[in-house]
Image (cartoon, grey):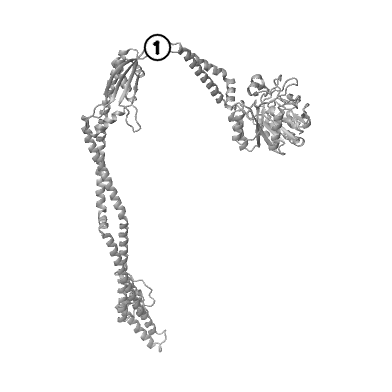
Amino acid sequence: MTPRIVKKYIIAFEKYKWIGLASFGLVVAGTIVVAIQPEPPVTYLIEAAVSYTGPPVSFSKTASEIQEQGKELTQEVLLSDQIVLKVADKVKVKPKTIATNVKLKMPEKTKSGALESPLIIVYYTDIDVNRGVDVLTELTKLMVQLSGDINTGRLKTIIKKINELLPQAKKELQAAENKLEEYDRRERPALVEAENGSLLGGISNSKIQQREIKFTIAGLDAQLRSLEKKLGLTVRQAYISSALSADTIIANLRSQIYQVESQIAVIRRDLRPEHPTMIQLQRQKGAAEELLQQRVDEVLGGGGMAAPIRGNLTGIRTQSSLDLTRQALANQMVALQTQRETLEQQLKQQIQQEEELRRESALIPNKQLERSRLEQAVGFKKAIYDQMQAKLTDAKAAEAETVTSLSLTKPPTPLPVVAKPKSVPATLAIGALLGAVIGGGVIFLLGSLEGTFKTREDIRESLKQRDVLLLGELPLISVDDLPPEALPVILSSHSPYLEFYEKFRSNLRRIGGKDAKVILITSVSSQEGKTLSAYNLGIASARAGKRTLIIETDLRSPSRASSLNVASYATLEPLLYYSSLSDCIRLVPEIENLYIIPSAGPALQSAAIIESSEMVRVIEDARQRYDLVILDTNDLSTSNDALLMQPYSDGIVLVARPNYTQENMLTEAIDQLVEGELGLLGAIINAADIRVSIPQPAEELPTSIPDLNLEAIRQTEDISTIFGKN
């Protein structure tokens, strides 16, 4: 079996062979021009060598480092434009000539990075030996001088850079020291207290004082409860009663009220309440009670001299009647309550103080860490500053020790170069080989850039990647003496091509099932053989005993029914033509059970005809009368007629053809049909490279036709016209 890539190349060769031959001819012509050129004049090779010198005895580290760095010169540095221009000015040679003829052999490095040899070998070719020696002499001299200039420049750069960075380093050091000093002024006392234990001691003392205050408050609470039990008064009630009982004005008013009440009690039996004396006494009593209430309000309100006393005063005379002993107990309760409140304030202050000490203690590790960070920053900045000072001192000491890292080891020595004579046959042979490779590559490249499937294997792989079923692979049908507009349909029942379409029909029947009665056949673009496939599928179905109807729904092209020996009489207006199934249907004379409705095209507004009710009735009637209905439609690249016919069908079959189907167009068509759920049943490969055994006449021995892929295409150049726009 021929490999796929070979098939692709043969197809591309058939199409682009003249371009490939032109490329071959151009390369061979160029080779001939090179071969007939005269022999070049004798040239001389001048050789010189410079070597890396070891660092001289030096007392500065910077000088040693610069000398070692000087051993890392590259070819680009040694042959810079500046060096070449200086040499050209000295010896009066074009700079481009010098750059072209000079070569350097740099020393190799070992795995450890050391140089295998200190030598740098310099080569120069020229037809004038004296001029070559002058060029190489001047070049090596400038190389040595360049090495010294580079080393000196490096040293000056180091000193300049240190002088630029030193003030900033000093400034940063001072800033770090100032931060540490400021931090110590602010946080050092707390850190010292934490270090000597004063902070923990303060927390412990605060806890002890809190415990003592709590014990004292507990004792005061016991005394207050005892006095409350003896007096029957709360602390607030006792304070109010003591304040009222101690006021002399309240005592006098209470005495007056008692006197008036005593008089009223004495004369009540003899006088009526309306008696003037009774009325007078009642008025005196009311006035005294009013004055008593005012005095109580003054005492409880503080009179502007003391804080007001707030409490529930149920009876003024009862609350203000304490004797001296009970008043002393009440005063004691007030004093104890005052002492208790004072102790509670002290306890609260101690608790707050303890919390502050604990918060300060919790911050001590962070403060210590911050101070340690500041100390490290100071140390780091100081180390950098000291290193820069030391480096600057060392660099200034190296000014007198920095020299070149190269020295001339071998002066320029001319060597004759014997040029090997040119072999014309060998040059032509190499040119011919190169031309063949380039010509073949151009052909292969042009074939690859076409974007079409070259072989059936390519189409099969693309369908497999997109999970599209392959319903069949149909060979190219070779028929002699075929009219230009006719299709190579399989009218003979003994045709060897019939079995391929029978396999296509059975696969379609197996996959679509009994529900797939109306099949729509289309292709991505024209000339892929969709009409031929539709006709031969109808023939295979009719040969299998199925009543089959082919409907040409490509209304943009004329009918191809003449290939089935059926004349098209679609001379009526299209809607009238499709209004009656019995008027537009034709029997295929040579195939039993096969019928066809020729196209009414070419017609204007084909989309309107396809979506008309007449077309719908034709397809629905055909669905009821026939076992299989095949709809031959336009290709997808020409119009959307195939998509308009899709709702009338039970499935779509795509036709692809090697060397005609575009890869991107097939991919887009499959994605559109699959994503739109338009019922894609599968695809077929038409005009595939398949070996077909054709029986020979009786007097001849049976034989088989070889691969018809290219041979048939070359012998029947007009077959592409057989498919027309299909």
| Residue at the image position 28 percent from the left and 45 percent from the top | 377
Picture layout, residue 626 above or below residue 569? below
Binning the other alpha carbons within 10 Å of mark 1 as few (below 14), some (14 to 19) or many (20 upward) gives few
Q: Is residue 338 above or below residue 360?
A: below
Residue 649: x and y, percent? Answer: 69, 36
Residue 174 pos. (x, y %): 24, 43
For residue 362, what is the image quadrant?
Answer: bottom left
Amino acid type for the residue under numbered disc 1? Pro
In the picture, measured across the screen, residue 497 lies left or right of residue 430, that is right
The quarter of the picture where residue 7 lies is top right
Across and down, in percent, residue 414 comes to: 31, 15
| Secondary element at tag 1 | loop
Quarter holding the N terminus is top right
Compare residues 443 and 309 and report the one nearer the observer. 443
| In this picture, residue 587 sits left or right of residue 35 | right
Residue that carries the numbered disc 1 in the rendered image: 40
Q: Which x, y percent locates residue 538?
A: 73, 30
Residue at x 32%, y 18% (from the top left corner) = 47
